Image (spheres, coloured by chain):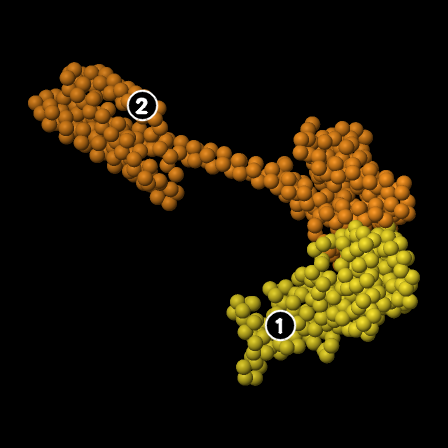
């Protein structure tokens, strides 16, 4: 039995997926969730192997939900928004069902899933760990604090620091960890507001209060909050460019 | 921009010679009155009128090629003054030569030079000012006419486009609901089809009919709520308050709906659990006041900006009423409020 979860904020839409799915006895529906919060709990509780995931939902989107999972299950996106297809592809969704979809189209998606599922243990079944966060320039970052979801506005972030596989997000409220790479993060942020000043540091330009020389050919960036951030040679060049020095 | 104020065909054909003739007659009789003999008076007046016309045309030419502006506005005063001085001097020289023997007349001429200069100077001065004013007005009229046309064009296009923007995802999600209901509850599926049809018809109206009654708008909003209730069931609660007697007021279509859409977007799509949206319509002076309230979560931004949005609504309000102060927003304690004032007749 393949444990399956349906996540959709519209009961009727979730019901339809359930109805279509009922013709496939190898799938076991473990839960239907109507928002990302419920879904996060259900995923931790049931460890499903497949999620039917709506994208536009209250509070957090389907994409943001995926970002919060350490090892996300296989995903079939279901949405009325065609414009998310590219993003869904980046997130390595198995398929992208545009609502309303026919039973035949649903069957096709199931077949696609099963063919990949059979070539078992295949990594490609799972959403990529390095897909660009929430597509376009995001204004917020969703993190998990124990089992709670926390939404951070990017403008409230002082700076980001790389820590192994994680990025620590420093805000006035404290430090939050999220599993992602510096590259992903950099791509998701507005380059006019954030600058990568060092291999491991990305700062909010609004928080910068000064720049001081440090040893030969290197600098330290001073933030309003008092912290000092190392600036690499290429980071210095980038800063000069962005700040118009 | 000096737009040939005095060079239009009718002006050149009739008015200019007319003024010259009146000038000539005036000068002639004035000279006779001063005791000047007939012949010198005739010649003097004729040349005085001719010089006036010549000076005037010269002024017209100069200002046509060279427009005085704020910075060198003094030229507008100085140039006519110098010009009239030159003309009066030239006129005196000519008549001195012509009537070299008429000492009595020449004496009078010499005495009158200053007055002539003053008079000619003032007249040319006034004409110059008039020319500038007329050309400015004509230029402005032309400009505002073109602006008006342009605005009308873009207004039509924009309104059409704004109507088009009506939430494709709303439509597709509703179709998906019908899709789900067809087997599970055929009766409700039918209801939904009818609701959606009426709603879409309402969206597409406005082509022929620009203003509708508030009662119609409320009916239309009711359909919108009904559709959302089919989609989200139990979660949506609507509190509608309509002041007595306002139902008959005429308003532009699709002004209130974006507010409701916004309330749904942030209320229903943005928060969890039950959502209460309240709507109040009342008349205040010459305005229909619409107040919409919905719960919201400050930190949450809702994805999918395909809807009308409030900025589009502001744009529409500006296009329809030419005002930017009709929409007010405030958010506090998890409740978002919008006040819309729609100008209505009497």
Q: Residue B116, percent across and down?
A: 24, 27
Residue A3 left/right relative to B287: right
Q: Residue A133, percent across and down?
A: 71, 65
Residue A238 left/right relative to B291: left
The residue wearing badge 1 is A196
Q: Residue B113, percent across and down?
A: 20, 28
Q: How many marks?
A: 2
Q: Residue B331, percent across and down?
A: 75, 51
| Whether residue B139 is situated above or below residue B267 in the rendered picture | above
Task: Confirm whether residue A26 shows in the render.
Answer: yes
Crowd around label 1: few <14 · some 14–19 · many ≥20 (10 Å): many
In front of the other: B126 or B176: B176
**Disc 1 from disc 2: Cα separation:** 76 Å
Q: Chain of mark 2?
A: B
Residue shown at the point (21%, 30%) measured from the top left: B88
Task: Confirm whether residue A9 shows in the render.
Answer: no
Residue A105 left/right relative to B343: right
Residue shown at the point (38%, 34%) measured from the top left: B3
Residue A136 left/right relative to B3: right
The residue wearing badge 2 is B13
Q: Which chain is yellow?
A: A
The quadrant of the picture occupied by the C terminus of chain B is: top right
Chain B: what color?
orange
In front of the other: A148 or B293: A148
Pick out the residue farthest to the left.
B101
């Amino acid at each position: 039995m393949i444990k399956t979860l349906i996540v959709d904020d519209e009961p009727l839409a979730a019901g339809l997926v359930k109805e279509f799915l009922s013709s496939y006895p190898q799938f076991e529906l473990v839960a239907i969730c109507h928002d990302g919060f419920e879904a996060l709990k259900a995923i931790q509780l049931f460890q499903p192997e497949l999620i039917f995931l709506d994208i536009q939902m209250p509070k957090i989107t389907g994409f943001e939900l995926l970002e919060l999972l350490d090892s996300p299950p296989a995903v079939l996106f279901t949405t009325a928004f065609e414009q998310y297809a590219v993003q869904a592809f980046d997130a390595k969704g198995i398929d992208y069902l545009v609502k309303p979809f026919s039973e035949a189209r649903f069957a096709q998606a199931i077949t696609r899933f099963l063919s990949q599922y059979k070539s078992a243990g295949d990594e490609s079944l799972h959403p990529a760990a390095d897909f660009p966060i929430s597509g376009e320039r995001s204004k917020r970052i969703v993190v998990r604090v124990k089992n709670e979801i926390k939404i951070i506005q990017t403008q409230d972030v002082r700076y980001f620091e790389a820590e192994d596989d994680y990025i620590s997000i420093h805000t006035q409220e404290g430090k939050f960890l999220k599993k992602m790479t510096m590259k992903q993060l950099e791509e998701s942020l507005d380059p006019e507001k954030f600058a990568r000043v060092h291999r491991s540091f990305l700062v909010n330009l609004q928080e910068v209060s000064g720049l001081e020389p440090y040893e030969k050919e290197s600098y330290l960036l001073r933030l309003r909050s008092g912290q000092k951030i190392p600036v690499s040679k290429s980071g210095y060049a980038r800063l000069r460019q962005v700040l118009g020095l | 921009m000096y737009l040939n104020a005095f060079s239009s065909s009718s002006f050149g054909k009739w008015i200019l010679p007319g003024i010259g003739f009146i000038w000539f007659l005036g000068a002639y009789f004035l000279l006779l009155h001063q005791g000047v003999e007939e012949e010198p008076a005739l010649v003097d007046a004729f040349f005085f009128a001719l010089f006036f016309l010549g000076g005037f045309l010269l002024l017209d030419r100069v200002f046509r090629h060279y427009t005085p502006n704020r910075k060198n506005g003094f030229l507008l005063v100085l140039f006519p003054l110098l010009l009239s001085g030159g003309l009066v001097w030239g006129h005196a020289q000519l008549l001195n030569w012509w009537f070299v023997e008429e000492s009595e007349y020449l004496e009078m001429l010499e005495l009158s030079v200053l007055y002539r200069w003053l008079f000619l100077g003032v007249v040319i001065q006034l004409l110059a000012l008039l020319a500038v004013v007329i050309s400015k007005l004509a230029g402005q009229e032309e400009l505002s006419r073109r602006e008006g046309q342009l605005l009308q064009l873009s207004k039509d296009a924009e309104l059409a486009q704004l109507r088009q923007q009506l939430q494709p995802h709303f439509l597709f999600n509703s179709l998906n609901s019908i899709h789900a209901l067809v087997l599970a509850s055929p009766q409700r599926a039918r209801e939904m089809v009818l609701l959606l049809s009426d709603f879409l018809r309402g969206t597409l109206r406005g082509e022929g009919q620009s203003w509708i009654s508030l009662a119609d708008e409320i009916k239309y909003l009711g359909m919108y709520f009904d559709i959302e209730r089919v989609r989200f069931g139990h979660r949506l609660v609507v509190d509608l308050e309509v002041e007595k007697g306002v139902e008959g007021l005429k308003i532009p279509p699709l002004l209130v709906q974006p507010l409701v859409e916004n309330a749904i977007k942030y209320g229903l799509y943005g928060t969890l659990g039950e959502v209460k949206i309240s709507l109040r319509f009342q008349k205040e002076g010459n305005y229909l006041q619409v107040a919409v309230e919905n719960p919201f979560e400050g930190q949450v931004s809702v994805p999918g900006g395909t809807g009308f949005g409030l900025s589009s609504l502001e744009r529409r309000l500006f296009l329809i009423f030419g005002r930017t102060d009709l929409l007010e927003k405030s958010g506090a304690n998890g409740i978002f409020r919008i006040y819309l004032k729609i100008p209505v007749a009497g």
